[in-house]
Amino acid sequence: MRTIDHWINGTAAASTSGSYGPVYNPATGEQQAQVGLASVAEVDAAVSAAKAAFTTWRSSSLSKRAEVMFRFHELVLQHRDEIANLLSSEHGKVPSDAAGELARGIENIEFACGIPQLMKGGYSEQASTGVDVYSIRQPLGVVAGITPFNFPAMVPMWMFANAIATGNTFVLKPSEKDPSVALLMARLLQEAGLPDGVFNVVQGDKVAVDRILEHPDIAAVSFVGSTPIARYIYATGTANGKRVQALGGAKNHMVVLPDADIDMAADAAVSAGYGSAGERCMAISVVVAVGDVADKLVPAIADRLPRLKVGPGTDPTAEMGPLITREHRDKVASYVAGAPAEGASVVVDGRHNDLPPEGFFLAPSLIDHVKPGMKAYDDEIFGPVLTVTRVDTYEEAVELVNRHQYGNGTAIFTRDGGAARQFQFDIQVGMVGINVPIPVPVAYYSFGGWKSSIFGDANIYGPAGIEFYTRTKTVTSRWPDPSTSSVDLGFPRTR
C-alpha cells in the first residue's frame, strides 16, 4: 500500500503518528493509498521549520519573491497533465473539470507575480512642517491553510500564492481525501527556488486542525469548507488570537425571469448544477423560476440530462465524474429519495441511470416544486441534484434568496438590463452573476459570500488576500533641519 507523506523543511517526511487514513479512487471504489495523519509533534515540526525560514524569506527582495512565483507558474504549466491526473485519480474529476480547476488556480499565481506593485504603501510629504508620514506593508509570519477535498489544487493556490509572495511562510493542511496534489506543489515550489521551510505540508485530520488553531507561532489561518466547520475554525482561531479567513457553505440560487433565453438558461443550469458532480460551493443548487418560465425551462433542463455523459476521469469524453466517497454519494441520493414525501416532484432520478458498476457514481437528478422547509431546499446537498422553486414575481424571488441562511453566490437570467441592475442592488449575496451562472471572481478581485457563507469579514485571494496576509505599519518621521547643521552638505540650507 502506497503511503502519502508530509513535506517539512524541504523534504518528504514519513508520518510517525502510526495513524493513517484511506485514499480511494472514486471512479473504482478501490483504496489506492494511505495517508499519514499528523500528530501534534509533526504539526509542531512543520511550524518550527516555517518559523525558522521566516526571517530570511521576509528579508528577501520583492523581485526575488516575484521571480520564484514566475518560475512556479511556468512549472505548473509544464506539469499540467500530471496535476490533472492526480485530480482525476483522487478526487474523480473528469478532464474538463480538472482543466478548469487548474486554470482558475493559475490565475492566482499570476496575480501574485505582481507582488512588487501589490506591496506598495503610501507617502505624504510635509504632513506637518518637516514631518513626513508613510505606510508600509509587512508579512505576519507563519500562516496556515486548511483546504477542502473538492478543489485540492485551486483552493491552496488561493491561499499560499499571496501568502508566500507577501513574505510569509506557509503550512498547508490539505484534505486527507485527496492529499497528493499538495506534495506535488511543494516539489514544484522547491524547484522554482523557494527556500526550504517556506512551504510545508502536514497531512491530517482534526488533530492537525486543532493544533494549527491553537499553535502560538501561527499568526493567521485560512479555511474553505462547510459552514459548521467554518464556524468552529473562526471561533477557535480567533479565541487563540489569530487572524482567520473562514469561508463556509452555500445554497446558490439562479433566478430566471420570464423574458430569459430558455436555451441559454437551461445550458447554464446544467453546467453550473452538475459540473464537478455538484461538489463545489459555487454550484447552482436552486433554480428560481419566475412566472410561467418553469413550464418551458424544466423540460429544457430535463432534455439535456440524458446527453450528459457520466464516467471516470480516464475517459476523455466524460462530462461528470463520481462523488468523493460512497458515504457522500449515498447521502446525496437520500435527498432524491425523500423529495416526494415532502411534496416535491422528481423529474429526473439519477439513482436509476445506467452508471459504471464500480465507484461512487450518481447521475444528475432534477427535482421540481421544491419549497422552503423541504430538506432538498434548506440543506447544502453538495452533489448533482438540481432543484426548481416556482414563484410568481421578481419580488418573491428576491425575498426567497435573501431569506436563505447562505449568501455565497447567485445569478439572474434576463434580457432586461434594468431588472439585472435592480437585482444586483437588491440581493443580499456576496457574488452575483448576470447571465453568468457561476460568478467566481477573477483573481484580481476577491472571493467571499455573505451571511452563513463566511465568518468574519476577510474575503480570500486578490486584493483581500494581500490585506489578510500583511499588516500595515505607519511611520511618522522628522529629520533635523539641514540649515542648522554645521556640516557642509553640498546643497543650499533652505527648505
Image: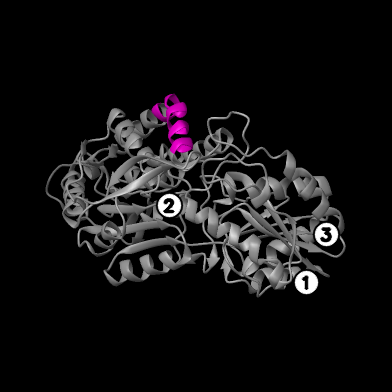
Mark 3 lies on residue? 294
How far apart, in angstroms, are the residues tagged by discs 1 and 3?
Answer: 17 Å
Q: In the rendered image, is residue 476 in sight? A: no
Mark 2 lies on residue? 148
Q: Pick out the residue farthest to the top.
A: 78
Q: Could you tell me which residue is drawn at 40 percent across and 60 percent down?
A: 245
Q: Give the label on residue 395, or none.
A: 1
- Mark 3 lies on a secondary structure that is helix
Classified by dominant secondary structure, the portion drawn in magenta counts as helix
Horizontally, residue 371 falls left or right of residue 393, namely left
The quadrant the N terminus occupies is top left
Q: Could you tell me which residue is drawn at 69 percent across and 68 percent down?
A: 426
Give yes or no for residue 382 being in the magenta stretch. Answer: no
Residue interval drawn in magenta: 75-89
- The kind of residue on which mark 1 rests is Glu
- The kind of residue on which mark 2 rests is Pro
Front one among 123 and 152: 152
Q: Is residue 439 shown above or below 34?
A: below
Estimate how packed mark 1 is, as few (under 14), some (14 to 19) or many (20 or more) residues with alpha carbons within 10 Å: few
Tag in front: 1 or 3: 3
- The kind of residue on which mark 3 rests is Ala
Q: Pick out the residue farthest to the left.
A: 486
Horizontally, residue 250 falls left or right of residue 390, namely left
Q: Earlier in the sequence, mark 1 or mark 3?
A: 3
Horizontally, residue 370 falls left or right of residue 300, namely left
Total labels drawn: 3
Q: Are marks 1 and 2 in contact (CB under 8 Å)?
A: no
Estimate how packed mark 2 is, as few (under 14), some (14 to 19) or many (20 or more) residues with alpha carbons within 10 Å: many
Q: Could you tell me which residue is drawn at 68 percent across and 73 percent down?
A: 372
- Mark 2 lies on a secondary structure that is loop
